[in-house]
Image (cartoon, rainbow, N blue to C red):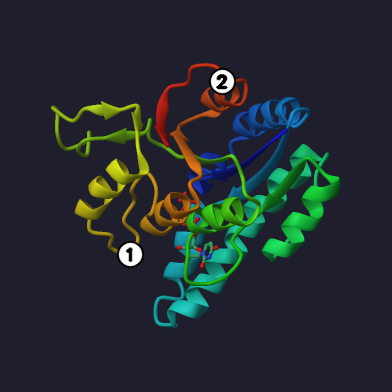
């Protein structure tokens, strides 16, 4: 039995309104995979988090982060309610997640503490649980040599080492709110803990990955 920790971006759950098809497919894929794997899903806050944080722009980063975490937990509750065969209250600590995972094969959570993102939290959970994989389900196919929206000659990278990934990430200046396929903190945690990371888009790729089939995305080993 493998342990897999999945970061599900808020933009996949709710691009503008809740994506019911995405929720249905996610549920089907996760329920099937949970027969052979322990799965933790950590949800992002998406545009709701950005919107609510914007309304608190004059407040401290701490206050903004706490609001962001509540938004991630709203998405976590949505997924947990939809899946049913998992926790029905959202855990708020690493210890609680581990305890829940002892009796359940699926645990859903949102952010845990201020000062990070759901990617960083997903990596911390993967580290704490000694997970086999961290998966980042995002809204891009995976890693490119350059930003594919800006550069036509950007090449897709299907497989690379943590060391090679660090060299690329070091070149990307991480500004608050800037999106990259995996944030620096998450990359550092997984590199140090030697956790393999898979990055891809969509539930079809999630299914392929969990069934050990060839998927369309990037793997960092
Ligand atoms: P997200 O992780 O959702 O930000 O957290 P994101 O990068 O916009 O992710 P997507 O779009 O869902 O993929 C939203 C905000 O909540 C706070 C941070 O302020 C973050 O920017 N947060 C989240 C935390 O402080 N800690 C956490 O563990 C998670």
Density class for disc 2 (Cα within 10 Å; few <14, some 14-19, many ≥20) is some
Q: How many numbered markers are drawn?
A: 2
The residue that mark 2 highlights is 208
Given residues 179 and 107, the one toward you in this image is: 107
Residue 134, position as x, y percentages in the image: 54, 43
Q: Are marks 2 and 1 in contact (CB under 8 Å)?
A: no
Residue 198: which disc? none
Given residues 126 and 193, the one toward you in this image is: 193
Whether residue 192 appears in this view of the structure is yes
The residue that mark 1 highlights is 176
Left or right of 220 on screen, residue 49: right
Instruction: Give the residue displayed 31% in from the left and 45% down from the top.
Output: 163
Quadrant location of the N terminus in the rendered image: top right
Quadrant location of the C terminus in the rendered image: top left
Instruction: Give the residue displayed 82% in from the left and 44% down from the top.
Output: 104
Residue 76 vertical position relative to residue 93 in the rendered view, above or below: above
Given residues 172 and 124, the one toward you in this image is: 124
Left or right of 8 on screen, residue 1: right
Label 1 residue near ligand 1, CB within 8 Å: yes
Q: Earlier in the sequence, mark 2 or mark 1?
A: 1
Whether residue 45 appears in this view of the structure is no
Residue 10, position as x, y percentages in the image: 52, 48
Most extreme residue toward the right is 103
Nearer the observer, disc 2 or disc 1?
A: 2
Quadrant housing residue 66: bottom right
Instruction: Give the residue displayed 51% in from the left and 29% down from the top.
Output: 202
Q: CA distance from mark 2 to mark 1?
A: 33 Å
**Label 1 secondary element:** loop
Residue 46 vertical position relative to residue 29 in the rendered view, above or below: below
Residue 35, position as x, y percentages in the image: 78, 28
Residue 28, position as x, y percentages in the image: 71, 26
Quadrant housing residue 145: top left
């Amino acid at each position: 039995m493998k342990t897999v920790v999945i970061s599900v971006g808020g933009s996949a759950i709710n691009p503008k309104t809740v994506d019911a098809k995405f929720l249905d497919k996610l549920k089907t894929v996760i329920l099937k995979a949970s027969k052979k794997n322990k799965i933790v899903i950590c949800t992002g806050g998406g545009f709701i988090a950005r919107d609510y944080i914007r309304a608190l722009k004059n407040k401290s980063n701490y206050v903004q982060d706490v609001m962001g975490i509540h938004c991630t937990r709203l998405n976590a509750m949505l997924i947990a309610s939809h899946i049913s065969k998992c926790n029905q209250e959202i855990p708020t600590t690493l210890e609680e997640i581990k305890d829940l995972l002892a009796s359940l094969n699926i645990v859903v959570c949102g952010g845990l503490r201020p000062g990070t993102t759901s990617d960083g939290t997903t990596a911390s959970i993967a580290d704490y649980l000694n997970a086999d994989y961290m998966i980042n389900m995002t809204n891009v196919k995976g890693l490119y040599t350059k930003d594919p929206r800006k550069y036509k000659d950007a090449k897709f990278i299907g497989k690379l080492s943590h060391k090679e990934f660090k060299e690329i990430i070091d070149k990307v200046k991480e500004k608050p709110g800037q999106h990259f396929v995996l944030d620096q903190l998450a990359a550092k945690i997984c590199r140090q803990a030697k956790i393999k990371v898979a990055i891809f888009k969509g539930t079809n790729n999630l299914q392929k990955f969990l069934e050990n089939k060839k998927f369309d995305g990037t793997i960092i080993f």
